[in-house]
Amino acid sequence: MVRSGPDHGQDSPARDNVPDMIGKLILTMVVVYVGWLVVRQRLREAAGEPAQTAVRELPAGALRVGAYALVGLMLAGSGLWLFLDWRAQRELVEVQVVNPYTGAVQRYQVRRGDIDGRSFRTPDGRRVRIAEMERMVIID
C-alpha cells in the first residue's frame, strides 16, 4: 500500500481510528446507561417507593472472584494492546523521498515508529529531514 500527500506518511484517520471510535462510543453508551439507572433509582426513592432489593443468588465469594477476573481481563487486554502497538512500531517499512524537480527517488528502510512528520531515523542511526518541496512515500 502506498501513502503520500499532505499527511506526510501518517496513517489515515478514517481507516485507522475506527476501533478507537467504536470503543469511545461503547464507553459513552455505558456511562449514559449507568447515569440513567442512577437517576431512575433516585426518582423512585423521592416518590416514596421502596428501593428494590436484589435477591442474592450468588455465593458470597462469587462477586469478589468476578471482580478479580474482570481486573485480570482488563490487564491482559491492556498488555496485549501494548504488545501489538510495540510490534507495529518496530515494523520495517520502505520510505521513498521524491524530489519534485528532478524526479530522483531515494529509498530508506525505516521502523514505523521512527517516522515523525517530515523527518525519520534509519535503523543505523541517521536522522533524515525532508525539505518542504520533497514528498515522502511510505510503502507498507
Image (cartoon, rainbow, N blue to C red):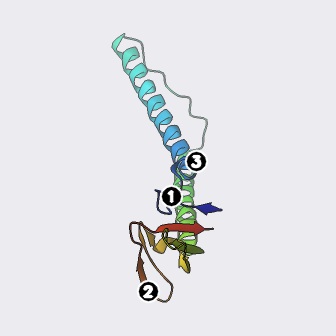
Specify few, some or many for label 3: CA neighbours under 10 Å numbering under 14, 14-19, or 20 or more.
few
Q: Position of residue 40 (x, y in %)?
A: 42, 19
Would you identify the image quadrant in which residue 87 lies?
A: bottom right
Q: Nearer the viewer, residue 45 or 53?
A: 45
Marks 2 and 3 close (CB-CB < 8 Å): no
Residue sitting at x 57%, y 56%: 73
Residue labelled with disc 2: 126
Q: Nearer the viewer, residue 97 or 31?
A: 97
Give the CA distance from mark 2 to mark 1: 23 Å
Seen as rendered, the residue at the extreme bottom is 124
Q: Reading the chain from its start, which is encountered first: label 2 or label 3?
A: 3
The mark nearer the N terminus, 1 or 3, is 1
54 or 134, nearer to the observer: 134
**Which part of the image, by quadrant, shows the C terminus?**
bottom right
What amino acid is at disc 1?
Answer: Gly
Q: CA distance from mark 2 to mark 3?
A: 57 Å
Above or below for 100 versus 22 = below
Above or below — where is 32 with respect to 127?
above
Left or right of residue 82: residue 119: left
| Secondary element at tag 1 | loop
Decide if residue 4 is in sight here. yes
**Residue furthest to the top:** 47
Say the numbered circle drawn on residue 62: 3
Q: Residue 15: horizontal and vertical position, in percent? A: 58, 49
Q: Foreground: 112 or 27?
A: 112
Residue at the disc numbered 1 = 5
Horizontal and vertical percent position of residue 96: 55, 73
